Image (cartoon, rainbow, N blue to C red):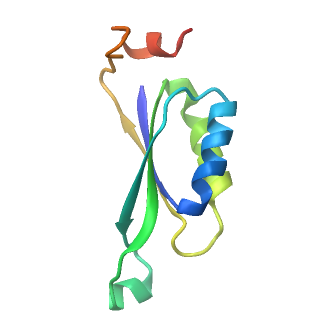
Amino acid sequence: MKLIWAVIRPSKKKELEKLLIEKGVIGITFEKVKGFGREEEMLLEPHELEHCKCEIIVPDEWVDWVVKTIYEHTHTGTPGDGIIAVISIDEVIDIVTGKKNNEIFMT
């Protein structure tokens, strides 16, 4: 199990959400965030930019295509595109059903 954590442009959220749901992702958390990255102009005169944080827990075998989908549909090649991280998860429990780990993704 992995947590895919991404910070993306707010303008890319709706398109990305639609694509991930169409491909079978069953749960996504989005949150408005502010911050700045490594762009030179930001380091000289820091100011916060609005972004959207996206968190998705997926089975290991989904990681590659979910990361690829996020990258391909949020990449513009300009500063401020964001970042993607993949983080290992030891255990996941669905509070409603009590299902654990990969059982959560089986219907």
Does residue 104 show up?
yes
Where residue 34 appears, as percent x and y from the top left, is 36, 66
- Left or right: 91 in relation to 26: left
Where residue 61 appears, as percent x and y from the top left, is 56, 25
Q: Quadrant of the N terminus?
A: top left
Q: Quadrant of residue 78?
A: bottom right
> Looking at the image, which residue is at 54% across and 75% down?
79
Q: Quadrant of the C terminus?
A: top right
Task: Classify 44 as above or below 83.
Answer: below
Q: Quadrant of residue 36?
A: bottom left
> Looking at the image, which residue is at 31% across and 20% down?
91
Does residue 68 show up?
no
Task: Classify 48 as above or below 59.
Answer: below
- Left or right: 17 in relation to 80: right
> Looking at the image, which residue is at 55% across and 66% down?
81
Where residue 88 appears, as percent x and y from the top left, is 36, 33
**Residue situated in front as seen by the camera: 107 or 79:** 107
**Residue situated in front as seen by the camera: 84 or 56:** 56
Task: Classify 47 as above or below 74.
Answer: below
Task: Classify 39 as above or below 18.
Answer: below
- Left or right: 61 in relation to 96: right
